[in-house]
Amino acid sequence: MACLDAAIVGSVSGARRVLTRIHALVHLTVRRRLADGFNNTDKSMQPPNRRAYSIPEVMCVLGLCRDSVYKLIREGRLPARKIGRRTVVLETDLQAFLEGLPMLGAA
């Protein structure tokens, strides 16, 4: 990456800025990939049905930050599974979570 130069990385705050930029780039890439999959109407070009989503993908789908997603998991509101060290959320669990959210303006 062109943004990683010695002057920026030379300090703790510089390293923090670099990590923030990397996180933003990863977040943007995941959002674009998800958008491409949902907006593509040609069935032959669509990715296969996802059975599980990584935490960054769940963040994009829900529009929440990492801490909020892990808080939902800790509270038991969003079931998650472990594959080795990786945490994933099954597509059915994510769908059930979204369907279980209260309707806006519901009494």
Image (cartoon, rainbow, N blue to C red):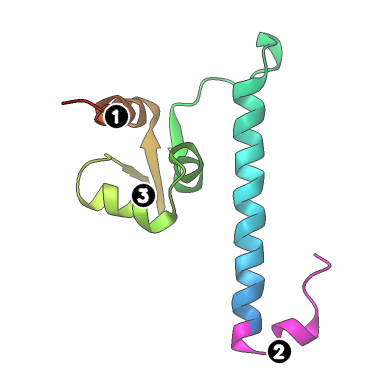
Question: First in sequence: mark 1 or mark 2?
Answer: 2
User: At numbered mark 2, what does the secondary structure look like: helix, strand or loop?
Assistant: loop
For image coordinates 43% across by 48% down, the residue present is 64
For image coordinates 39% across by 28% down, the residue present is 91
Q: Which residue is mark 2?
A: 10
Region in magenta = 1-13
25 with respect to 73 (left or right): right
Tell me the distance, in whole angstroms, between the alpha carbons under discs 3 and 2: 32 Å
Q: Which residue is mark 3?
A: 69
For image coordinates 27% across by 31% down, the residue present is 101
- Neighbours of disc 2 within 10 Å: few (<14), some (14-19), many (20+): few
- Neighbours of disc 3 within 10 Å: few (<14), some (14-19), many (20+): some
The amino acid on which the numbered mark 1 sits, given as a three-letter code, is Leu
User: At numbered mark 1, what does the secondary structure look like: helix, strand or loop?
Assistant: loop
The amino acid on which the numbered mark 3 sits, given as a three-letter code, is Val
Tell me the distance, in whole angstroms, between the alpha carbons under discs 3 and 1: 21 Å
56 with respect to 29 (left or right): left
Question: First in sequence: mark 3 or mark 1?
Answer: 3
**What's the mark number on residue 68?**
none
Residue 32 is situated, as x and y percent measured from the top left of the image, at 66, 38
Q: Cβ–Cβ below 8 Å for labels 3 and 2?
A: no
Question: Which is in the foreground here, disc 1 or disc 2?
Answer: 1
Q: Is residue 55 above or below residue 8?
A: above
Residue 5 is situated, as x and y percent measured from the top left of the image, at 80, 79
Q: Which residue is mark 1?
A: 104
